[in-house]
Image (tube, rainbow, N blue to C red):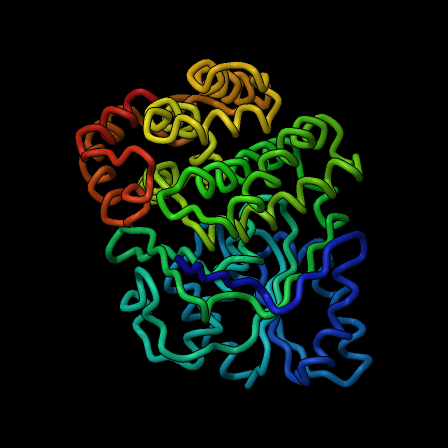
């Protein structure tokens, strides 16, 4: 049996990695640079600091800073218009998963005809886009190392998952120093998101010999460093560990798959505008409890990798300990129950349950789960997570 593995051509990880931007642009021959970021990151001066050496080297630079959480098709089209006006030959994404996802979509629409929704699903993009250099400022999505983008179509009222090798960034500059200012809540949400990537990549029906070591390394790093990063935001070793975990998690799931947590998470984001990391975090214990019977040995291995279970414990006991440990972790990190999330109204929640379940199944992710649910079971899981 053969396995396909996609990754950025170049990954530079560690303190100061973002300072490699100009050398990498020079290496690939880029001259007209288009930054994609969000208003907050631009307000910090980070993009201006990254752009200063580029100006000095004579490169033409433009900045698009209108990316919002859960970027929409309109955001992508607005960015594409600015990129076309600048006649850019490279896209530099600076920020969290939203900015990197938007940058990927903008880059491929420069060389592929729209509308974007026709590429929803798997392996539908015919042409390579402009090269993307991803500089993450959070340790969560791993989007700097994935061939996936998630863009919200407000007309269809759905988060589109698009997977294609043409979406893989050419270069990832993973500089943990850029994550030192992350607030505790964001650290918790995207940190559990990273854990979810590692776990789902490892238990997926598409797990393989290339993705497994990356997934387990991701899980071990999160278990070791997340609590410290949350408690001590400027703890450099913990931040470095979480940045590495996020990148490894992205490499793992993009070469395996995500599963039911992500399938259920996206509709929550659409309906209630929950941040992606938070919606994954609130679902992880509940979905894990549902799924363990489908991959008992693998969930037990995860529990042991996290030091939640001992090597000599049975797989059943280890898996039960894992579920309890995930619930305990959420409480420790002050991750709320679904009912306590801002903007989640119970009446509306009940009204959209069936649509969310249908949208979750339509995404394809639940079908990769070790235990594949029905729509009714997904509805029950949403209620259990409430």
Question: In screen coordinates, is 361 left or right of 78?
Answer: left
Q: On the image, which quarter does residue 54 sit in?
A: bottom right
Residue at point 73% right, 69% down?
21
Rendering coords of residue 164 (x, y %): 40, 65
Rendering coords of residue 299 (x, y %): 45, 28
Rendering coords of residue 133 (x, y %): 62, 68
Tell me the quadrant of the picture where the N terminus can be found: bottom left
| Position of 334 relative to 281 (above/below) | above
| Position of 314 relative to 361 (above/below) | above
Tell me the quadrant of the picture where the C terminus can be found: top left
Question: In screen coordinates, is 303 left or right of 178?
Answer: left
Q: On the image, which quarter does residue 62 sit in?
A: bottom right
| Position of 33 relative to 277 (above/below) | below
Q: Report the front residue among 365 and 67.
A: 365
Q: Report the front residue among 127 and 183.
A: 127
Rendering coords of residue 221 (x, y %): 65, 36
Residue at point 46% right, 13% down?
317
Question: In screen coordinates, is 11 left or right of 346?
Answer: right
All told, the count of numbered labels is 0
């Amino acid at each position: 049996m053969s396995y396909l593995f996609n990754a950025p051509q170049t990954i530079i990880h560690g303190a100061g990695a973002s300072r490699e931007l100009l050398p990498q642009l020079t290496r690939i021959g880029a001259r007209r640079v288009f930054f994609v970021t969000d208003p907050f990151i631009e307000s910090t001066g980070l993009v201006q600091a990254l752009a200063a050496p580029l100006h000095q080297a004579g490169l033409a630079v433009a900045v698009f800073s209108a990316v919002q959480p859960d970027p929409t098709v309109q955001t992508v089209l607005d960015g594409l218009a600015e990129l076309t006006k600048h006649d850019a030959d490279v896209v530099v994404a600076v920020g969290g998963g939203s900015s990197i996802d938007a940058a990927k979509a903008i880059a491929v629409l420069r060389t592929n005809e729209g509308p974007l929704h026709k590429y929803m699903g798997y392996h539908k993009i015919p042409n390579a886009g402009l090269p993307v250099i991803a500089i993450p400022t959070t340790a969560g999505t791993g989007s700097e190392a994935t061939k996936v983008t998630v863009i919200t179509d407000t007309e269809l009222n759905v988060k589109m998952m698009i997977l294609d090798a043409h979406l893989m960034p050419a270069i990832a500059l993973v500089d943990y120093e850029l994550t030192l200012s992350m607030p505790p809540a964001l650290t918790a949400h995207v940190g559990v998101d990273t854990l979810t990537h590692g776990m789902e990549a490892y238990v997926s029906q598409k797990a393989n010999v290339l993705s497994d070591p990356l997934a387990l390394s991701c899980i071990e790093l999160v278990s070791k460093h997340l609590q410290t990063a949350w408690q001590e935001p400027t703890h450099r070793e913990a931040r470095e560990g979480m940045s590495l975990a996020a990148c490894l998690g992205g490499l793992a799931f993009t070469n395996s798959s995500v599963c039911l947590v992500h399938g259920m998470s996206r509709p929550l984001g659409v309906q209630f505008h929950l941040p992606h990391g938070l919606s994954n975090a609130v679902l992880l214990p509940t979905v894990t409890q549902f799924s363990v019977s489908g991959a008992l040995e693998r969930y037990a291995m995860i529990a042991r990798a996290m030091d939640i279970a001992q090597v000599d414990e049975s797989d059943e006991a280890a898996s039960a300990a894992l579920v309890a440990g995930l619930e305990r972790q959420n409480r420790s990190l002050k991750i709320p129950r679904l009912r306590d999330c801002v903007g989640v109204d119970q009446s509306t929640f009940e009204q959209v349950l069936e649509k969310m379940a249908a949208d979750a199944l339509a995404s394809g992710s639940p079908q990769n789960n070790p235990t594949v649910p029905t729509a009714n079971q997904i509805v029950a899981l949403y209620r259990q997570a409430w």
